[in-house]
């Protein structure tokens, strides 16, 4: 089977990283808002957590898109996504209704993203040499 065109692969990876690039840039451009968000979720040292989040989202996305240590960037964003999902999308704590429904959808969509990053990790470790 022929390998897909590199532009097709890169475009798919860009789509996968798009939310993290957008999120990292938005947090970078509104750092006080990023700190407020970290504090809202009771994360330790909100200013440090916000800075680490910005760095992780942008650096890991760049690793994936450039192919430099792609597997590590994918593993980092996958783990970050699972952790952030467990912190921010705790739908089971909400009463039945629209808000719970929407948060449950977000929870499982984020698990899907984490799964995609796991596939990028596995693919890069076995085929991208």
Image: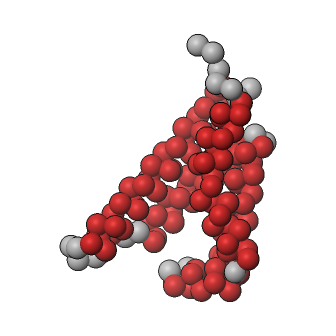
Whether 103 is drawn above or below 6: the answer is: below
Q: Nearer the viewer, residue 95 or 72?
A: 95
Q: Nearer the viewer, residue 2 or 49?
A: 2
Left of 78 or right of it: where is 112?
left
Q: Position of residue 18 (x, y in %)?
A: 62, 55
Q: Position of residue 110 (x, y in %)?
A: 46, 56
Whether 106 is drawn above or below 32: the answer is: above
Left of 66 or right of it: where is 56?
left
Instruction: Residue 33: name its quadrant.
Output: bottom right
- State whether residue 122 appears in this view: yes
Whether 114 is drawn above or below 68: the answer is: below
Q: Nearer the viewer, residue 123 or 101?
A: 101
> Could you tell me which quadrant the N terminus lies in?
top right
Q: Position of residue 115 (x, y in %)?
A: 48, 45
Residue at the left extreme, as displayed: 96
Q: How is the image coloured?
A: secondary structure
Instruction: Residue 12: name its quadrant.
Output: top right
Name the residue at 59% across, 48% down: 16
Name the residue at 50% across, 50% down: 113
> Could you tell me which quadrant the C terminus lies in?
top right
């Amino acid at each position: 089977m022929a390998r897909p065109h590199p532009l097709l692969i890169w475009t798919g990876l860009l789509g996968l990283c798009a939310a993290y690039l957008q999120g990292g840039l938005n947090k970078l451009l509104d750092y006080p808002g990023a700190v407020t968000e970290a504090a809202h979720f009771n994360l330790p040292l909100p200013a440090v957590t916000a800075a680490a989040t910005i760095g992780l989202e942008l650096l890991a996305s760049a690793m994936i898109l450039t192919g430099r240590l792609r597997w590590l960037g994918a593993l980092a964003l996958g783990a970050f996504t699972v952790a952030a999902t467990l912190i921010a999308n705790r739908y089971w704590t909400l009463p039945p209704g629209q808000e719970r429904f929407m948060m449950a959808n977000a929870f499982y969509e984020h698990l899907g993203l984490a799964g995609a990053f796991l596939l990028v990790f596995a693919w890069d470790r076995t085929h991208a040499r």
